[in-house]
């Protein structure tokens, strides 16, 4: 280990997802935006035009639109493993918002970290790995 | 940064938390963005089940008192019938999926799959904890496990036993992935005795442990290689830091090959590996109208 060890993890699937039925890990999306402020205009447009279609496409995700006065536009996503993420939607066009939500809906909810590889082979070397008894035939 | 005159209030709050511990987490339903109808619909879509809302809610509501047993769809009734169904189906599955294993090994796999902590972990990752109504009198792990079993019985009542069995195959059985049956689940205390017994049944000469190799005996890291022989055949060999450990290890290795539970042997049928013949065999005891299966 060096001093510069950053946070890292092995690639893993949640709950052996996909071995049986595949379960979408995103469970809830909450769109927070303002009813009148100009910074939320793209989110309002998205809610009017695309949100219903998005919700229909993902029947296992609950979508909440929470308008409130003088609030900056943001999205809060909750995953089945209990993790929550909040991201700003400021200065995003409606199609960019849709792209962002699609990305969230395809994720497993596990925190994004540097992935270290877990490489395994049953035959690391054709000759066989050297060990103490390599060139000794066993005697009974 | 809190205002200067609030400092003592915040310090007192900190002190209170130090003494009393953190507050219990609030239920998700106490937040403003919560619509129970939408949540239940999404929950059913997520798990691909069709259960009436009232039945699902009663499976997810921990009762404060024991209800009268006359009620057909109460929590206690669902739990009682559900645990019977799940136990029967899981033991039937294990019997079909591990035909070479002894009954002792099979029951250890069933026990592992039906462990409260295992089922509670499953329920937690399938989103049960948000919909669960707890009384707070018992540990949430226990109630999570119970409510998953009760919901399986709810599926059984509304969609039939085959759908409930498919739910178990989809979610409970894949918990075996990545687990070694002998090393992680069964952990037999005396594998050598098991091996002797299985050889006796198959009519082979009893296994004999012989020291094949040794190295560094007088050092702090000695290594012994023990081979198990049945007559003149070498069945398995393994190395460890003592002769007893090496012998146990070799016996476990031999057992894995005999029971077909080695990492390299064929994995138990689940997911894509389930073929129609196996499913027919699994669902046969569940179906009343036996002719419907063959069509």
Image (tube, rainbow, N blue to C red):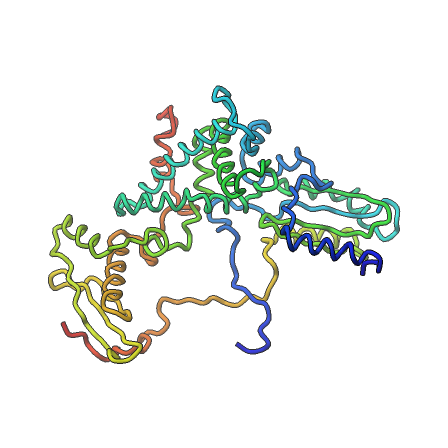
**Can see residue B51?**
no
Along the viewing direction, whichever of B150 and A87 lies nearer the viewer: B150
Please indicate whether residue B99 sits to the left or right of residue B289 in the image. Answer: left
User: Total number of numbered labels?
Assistant: 0
Q: Position of residue B20 (x, y in %)?
A: 64, 50
Compared to B226, does B290 lie above or below? above
Q: Is residue B89 left or right of residue A72?
A: left
Q: Residue at x 20, y 66 (%)?
A: B227
Residue at x 14%, y 72% (from the top left corner): A140
Instruction: Say which residue appears at 55% left-offset and 33% top-offset.
Output: B62
Q: Toward the viewer: B27 or B44?
A: B27
* Residue at the extreme top: B70
* Left or right: B141 as drawn, with respect to B224: right
Question: Dividing the picture into quarters, in which one does residue B81 lie?
Answer: top left
- Residue appearing at x 27%, y 76% in the figure: B222
- Which image quarter holds the C terminus of chain B? top left
Estimate the x, y position of residue B113 in percent, counting from the top left: 41, 44
Q: Which sits in the foreground, B122 or B23?
A: B23
**Relative to B82, does residue A122 appear above or below in the rendering?**
below
Q: Position of residue B19 (x, y in %)?
A: 64, 53
Give the left or right position of residue A39, taking residue B65 as reference: right
Looking at the picture, how far across and down is residue B253, in whole percent? 27, 60
The answer to which quarter of the image holds residue B65 is top right
Q: Quadrant of the N terminus of chain B?
A: bottom right
Q: Is residue B97 visible from the viewing direction of this image? A: yes
Give whichever of B12, A44 is nearer the camera.
B12
Relative vertical location of residue B64 with respect to residue B114 in this rendering, above or below: above
């Amino acid at each position: 280990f060096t001093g510069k060890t950053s946070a890292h993890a092995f690639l893993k699937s949640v709950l052996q997802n996909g071995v049986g039925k595949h379960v979408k890990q995103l469970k809830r999306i909450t769109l927070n935006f303002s009813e009148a402020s100009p910074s939320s205009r793209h989110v309002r447009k998205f809610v009017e035009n695309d949100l219903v279609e998005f919700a229909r496409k993902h029947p296992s995700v609950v979508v909440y639109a929470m308008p409130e006065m003088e609030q900056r536009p943001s999205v809060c996503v909750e995953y089945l493993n209990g993790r929550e993420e909040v991201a700003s939607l400021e200065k995003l066009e409606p199609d960019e918002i849709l792209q962002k939500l699609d990305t969230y809906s395809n994720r497993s909810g596990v925190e994004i970290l540097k992935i270290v590889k877990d490489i395994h082979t049953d035959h690391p070397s054709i000759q066989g790995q050297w060990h103490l008894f390599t060139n000794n035939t066993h005697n009974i | 940064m809190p205002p200067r005159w609030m400092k003592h209030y915040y310090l007192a709050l900190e002190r209170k938390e130090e003494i009393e511990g953190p507050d219990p987490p609030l239920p998700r339903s106490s937040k403003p963005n919560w619509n129970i109808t939408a949540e239940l619909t999404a929950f059913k879509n997520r798990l691909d089940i069709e259960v009436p809302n009232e039945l699902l809610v009663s499976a997810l509501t921990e009762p404060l008192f024991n209800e009268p047993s006359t009620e057909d769809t109460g929590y206690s009734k669902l739990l009682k019938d559900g645990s019977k169904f799940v136990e029967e189906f899981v033991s039937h599955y294990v019997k079909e999926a591990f035909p070479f294993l002894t009954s002792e090994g099979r029951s250890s796999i069933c026990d592992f799959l039906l462990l409260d902590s295992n089922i509670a972990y499953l329920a937690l990752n399938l989103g049960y904890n948000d919909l669960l109504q707890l009384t707070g009198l018992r540990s949430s792990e226990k109630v999570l496990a119970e409510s998953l079993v009760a919901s399986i019985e709810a599926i059984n009542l509304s969609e039939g036993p085959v759908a409930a069995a498919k739910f178990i195959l989809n979610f409970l059985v894949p918990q075996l992935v990545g687990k070694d049956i002998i090393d992680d689940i069964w952990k037999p205390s005396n594998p050598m005795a098991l091996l002797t017994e299985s050889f006796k049944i198959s009519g082979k000469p009893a296994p004999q442990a012989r020291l094949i190799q040794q190295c560094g005996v007088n050092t702090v890291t000695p290594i012994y290689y023990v081979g198990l022989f049945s007559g003149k055949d070498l069945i398995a060999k393994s190395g460890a830091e003592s002769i007893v450990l090496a012998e146990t290890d070799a016996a476990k290795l031999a057992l894995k090959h005999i029971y077909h539970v080695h990492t390299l042997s064929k994995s138990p049928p689940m997911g894509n590996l389930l073929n129609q013949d196996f499913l027919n065999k699994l669902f046969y005891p569940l179906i009343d109208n036996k002719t419907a299966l063959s069509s």
